[in-house]
Amino acid sequence: MLLVWFELLARLREFAVFWTRKTSPEDCGCAPTEAERAQFTAPMSRRGALGVGIVGLAALGTGVVAGVAPAAFAASYPSWDDVQRAKNNEAAKAGEVARIEGLIAQLTDNVNRTQAEAQRLAGEFFVAQEAFFDAAQQAEDLQAQADQQAADALDAANKAGKVAAQLYRNGGDDTAMELFFAGSAAGADDLLARLGSMDKLVQRNGKVYAAAIAARDNAQALSDQAVVAREERDRLKAIAEDAMLKAQDAAMAAQAALDQQTSHLGELQAQLAALKDTTASTVKGYQDGVEAARKAKEEADRLAREQAERDKANAGAGGGGGGGGGGAPAPSGWARPSSGRHTSGYGQRYSQCGPNYCASGFHRGVDMAAGCGSGIYAASAGVVTMAWPYSGFGNYVRIDHGGGVQTSYAHMSRIFVRAGQRVSAGETVGAEGETGNSFGCHLHFEVYVHGSAVDPQPFMRARGISV
């Protein structure tokens, strides 16, 4: 039995050294190094262009996305004087009608093509982003398991190492002999009792030693798996980044095409109607109609914004939510993005299904509902990086707040901001709706830290806001 005891002591000496030197996880290779941890939380590079809208500005002028026609095509639009002259000349009228019909067709085709390409690339970005999120979560889970196993190994080594280190410091084998022969045995029974106690001690320490070895090996295996998972995460991160840039270019080009169509289509259609009109209606009457329609749209936008501001003021007076109501900034500089009640939280949930789609079983944001058309507000100051329809999110806005933090706002009925625009905390960025994959009017609000979605509730709570 003494031989067994001394053999166990020899094996425990490596843990004694481990325990006395308090080996770090980096030394044993059981956990990620500080460099690895920093890389794991590094922000997704957006190449500097996204925050200031440079990519979008390039798209406005050149239509750089493959398969997307330039938003602005060379066109000379007719003036109302041109229309008046053509209307007074039958020969010129036919040519002007054909010209205007061609311009209308070009505008419409340009919008349709750029929007279709933008939707396609937005879908690719969505898929790539979800794959990156899943891979990042897997890498994080594996690393957490590796860290736990490393802690277990250290705990077991401490338990065994304390005994072995003490014996080692006090003279090693001689100490074990002293423990065994200390005092005189009262008789055979007493000697057998001591042998039995030593047998139990050897057995117990043997189990501790085995547990420590197993935990250490598991920690190393899981750490190796985490390294592979991080490599896959980084590969998917690069794919998602590239998809995001392409989607943003395409969305900018589509927005520019739509702006151009909005700017010219109504007038072209009115000019065409004036040319085809054989009654006594004047060209000026059609021109006035275009101006009246423009003013009506501006008024509708103004009323929508004012309603959103009234919602914010009413919610602020009611004190709904930490830091005041929706849109009311707290001392932290953050604001509640909606005055609505919390309807769904972050994390695993029951997957709802509608006629056309099923919601994800993992919810990467929180939902708030204040009513269709209610205001949606920037959670903090920052730069708008996305402001357009985005896959199942519907009308979507994303804001970069700096420091690796972004927030997003989905399912809006209307968007009041543009990519590249700087907004302040609590500024109205849109109106609540049910665009995209939605089961009713609400705001889906997300928070990203260094490219990964996090639970908005504790994040906002730390800034004095409840969501």
Image: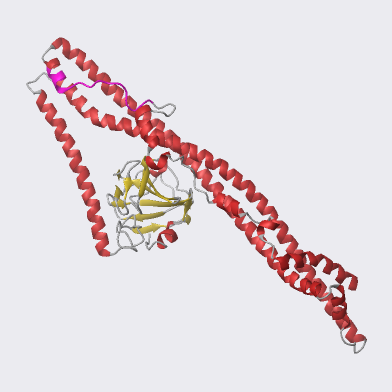
| 28 relative to 53, above or below | below
Q: Position of residue 391 (x, y in %)?
A: 41, 40
Residue 329 vs residue 411, the one in the foreground: 329
Within the image, what quadrant is residue 416 found in? top left
Which residue ends up furthest to the top in the rendered image? 91
Question: Would you say 11 lies left or right of 370 here?
Answer: right
- At a point 12% along the width and 19% down the height, the residue shown is 84
Determine if residue 1 is in view: no
The quarter of the rendered structure image containing the N terminus is: bottom right
Q: Position of residue 269 (x, y in %)?
A: 20, 25
Determine if residue 411 is in view: yes
| 370 relative to 302, above or below | below
Question: Would you say 412 lies left or right of 123 here?
Answer: left
Within the image, what quadrant is residue 110 found in? top left
| 237 relative to 348, above or below | above
Question: Would you say 368 lies left or right of 125 here?
Answer: left
- At a point 19% along the width and 40% down the height, the residue shown is 298
- At a point 16% along the width and 9% down the height, the residue shown is 91
Residue 13 vs residue 187, the one in the foreground: 13
Q: Is residue 415 magenta?
A: no
| 96 relative to 38, above or below | above
Q: Position of residue 452 (x, y in %)?
A: 49, 50
Q: Main secondary structure of the magenta part?
A: loop
Which residue ends up furthest to the bottom in the rendered image? 186
The magenta span reads 69-84
The quarter of the rendered structure image containing the C terminus is: bottom left
Q: Position of residue 5 (x, y in %)?
A: 86, 71
